[in-house]
Amino acid sequence: MGPVIVDVNGYELTTEDKEILAHPLTGGLILFSRNYGDHAQLTALIKSIRKAANAPIVISVDHEGGRVQRFREQFTRIPAMGKIAELYADDRETAKQFTQQCGWMLAAELLAFDIDLSFAPVLDLERGSQVIGDRSFHADPSWVTDLSTQLCIGMHKAGMKTTGKHFPGHGSVLADSHIALPIDERSLADITATDLLPFKSLIANAQLDAIMPAHVIYQQVDSKAAGFSQYWLQTVLRQQLGFKGAIFSDDLSMHGASVAGNYLARAEQAMWAGCNLLLACNDRKGVEALLDGLDNNLTTDDFGLKHTSNFSLAELKNSRLWQDTATSVAKFNQQFS
């Protein structure tokens, strides 16, 4: 498959969208809130995307729960992961069971629409980053490890692959990498003893199918942001942690990626560092620069990211599992709102 993950602007595909989806370098598409109106519209959009694509592609979305849930109306409202830690503080086993239910629910509802991936779980520690905040389970790496493992188990049970982010940890920098270039001043020893622990555990226990690195510079470790760093992606992630799955770049349009140069240079640097798939969002000219500038013969393994589920939304909602899980989530939201 091609290495570039593109986006589209609206509820329907334009002629230009179709041309980009048919390009041999296009291997996937990420959806946003702007692409969702209702169930019927989303179903039609997904079908048109599949039809326009040159080959089977990976369709993805950020659907973590809380404030990062792109589809809201007519979807189950998944709580912010940080809210689940409130339950975990009182009743760990119930919280773990509930987190697994959330993982299953968020994945199953997306799979019913033929969407392959939600970029989850967030493995960052809650250490003051505003852009992370309650997207993180907690500040304690053992809590994050415990709960994120259950989210992954639930997603896998539904039939969806998982993506741990933002490697090696975005939670301790105040700046938002969408609009700035965050710099983390901590030592490698400090990062290894804290932020890396959830990644290390979930990789060792085969819970992560993909990784998304942070657009953050860990200044005492490498002068390059993690997503452009061979040290972080090759030495640490591949060699030391033994990760075998896919590595997605975070969005190359983010300000935190601009340190690597123009759009084409960012893509080339990310691939040189070890990224297999390149997220190129919210900048159509940037996407065009990639498709024009990269070798059309570039391909990457699909890493088994495409789903193989085959159930409709009606079938899902008629199941006892969906009904029981929806009741649990609604009760939690009412209690912890």
Image (tube, rainbow, N blue to C red):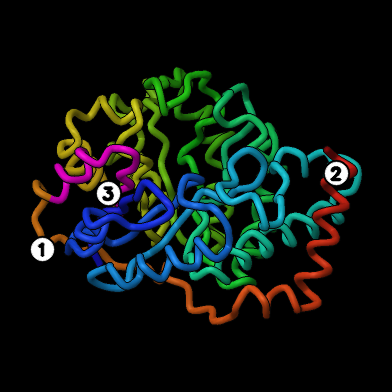
Q: Residue at x 67, y 77 (%)?
A: 314
Determine the secondary structure under disc 3.
loop
**Which residue position is annotated with label 1?**
297
The verdict on residue 35 being magenta is no
Q: Are marks 2 and 3 in contact (CB under 8 Å)?
A: no
Q: CA distance from mark 1 to mark 2?
A: 50 Å
Judge whether 7 appears above or below 224 on screen: below
Q: Are marks 1 and 2 in contact (CB under 8 Å)?
A: no
Question: Is residue 150 in view from this perspective?
Answer: yes
For the residue marked with disc 2, what is the amino acid? Leu
Q: Residue at x 50, y 61 (%)?
A: 42
**Which residue position is annotated with label 3?**
274
Q: CA distance from mark 1 to mark 3?
A: 18 Å
Q: Which region is colored magenta? A: 277-291
In the drawing, what numbered circle is on residue 19?
none
Percent from the top left, x then y, of residue 268?
Answer: 17, 43
Closer-to-camera residue (145/299): 299
Q: Residue at x 57, y 57 (%)?
A: 38
The verdict on residue 279 being magenta is yes
Location of residue 132 by image quarter: top right
Quadrant where the image shows the C terminus: top right
**Which residue position is annotated with label 2?**
87
Judge whether 43 appears above or below 126 on screen: below
Percent from the top left, x then y, of residue 158?
Answer: 62, 71
